[in-house]
Amino acid sequence: MTAPPRSPRAALAALTPMGQLRAGRLPRRVVQLFVGLTMYGVAMAMFVRAGLGLDPWDVFHYGVARLTGMDLGTAVIAVSIPVLLLWIPLRQWPGLGTIANAIWIGVATNIALAVIPTMHGLPTQIAVFALGLVINGAGGALYIGAQLGPGPRDGLMTGLHRRTGLSLRLVRTALELTVLGTGWLMGGVVGFGTLAYAVAIGPLVQAFLPWCIVRLDVPLNAPSESAPAAQPV
């Protein structure tokens, strides 16, 4: 007697903001979204306290915070606003997850920074940074898997990719090098951790994502309303 075939694993769907809300299992997806965003903010605070360097966008956020006197989380929120405004000429619409991302990661970061102390000693710094990487990867997979819209920075990247026709990898590299260089000039923290993040975060999110995607009540890979078809990464 043969075993019944396994059901296919859920996959990301191409949906408009309204389609995301109508795709079913909304309470579970909203909870997952905020758990993921909270983990992302906690991981950001861990990177800061480890003192080994930040990811490119957070180097920029840290630089903005230093220049303005803002808390780091407040700077994250402040930067999200002009980034979202750049979506307008790209003809992109934010989803619930986009707005939550723009606000809640900054809030979670400030709360975590108030609790997590500065690390001393290289072994402790490396351990905290490594744990932060895992938490960041899992948190990113959770909020992506909730399928409630990309974050402001990810949406900017994919919007530029669609509008310019340039490869997604080229657009991402150009954006991250720009914010990294600008953030470093403003006093952002660049170090070994910056390189480690760049190398490790993609594989980590990819490893966690298949287990975090919520199965929706829509056909896979079928655009909802006027949403563009998903682009290969």
Image (cartoon, grey):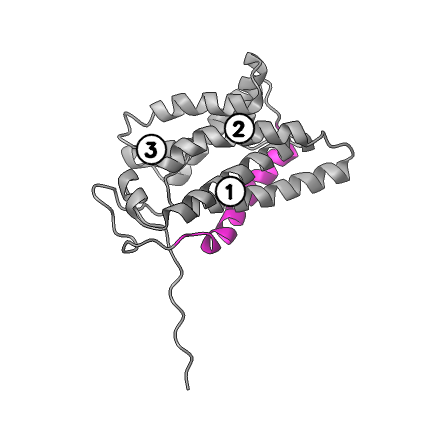
Marks 1/2: CA–CA distance: 13 Å
Q: Secondary structure at mark 3?
A: loop
Q: Name the residue type under label 1.
A: Val
Which quarter shows the N terminus?
Answer: bottom left
Report the residue marked by disc 3.
Answer: 94
> Is 211 one of the magenta-colored residues?
yes
User: 215 or 8: which is nearer to us?
Assistant: 215
Report the residue marked by disc 1.
Answer: 35
Q: Is residue 146 visible?
A: no
User: 185 or 98: which is nearer to us?
Assistant: 98
Q: Residue furthest front?
A: 27
Question: Magenta residues?
Answer: 190-214
* Pointer 1 or 3: first along the chain: 1
Q: Tell me residue 210's x, y (percent).
A: 45, 55
Residue at 30 percent of width and 49 percent of height? 23
Give residue 197's quadrant in the image: top right
Q: Is residue 231 depicted above or below 79 in this figure?
A: below
- What number is the disc on residue 107? 2
Marks 1/3: CA–CA distance: 19 Å
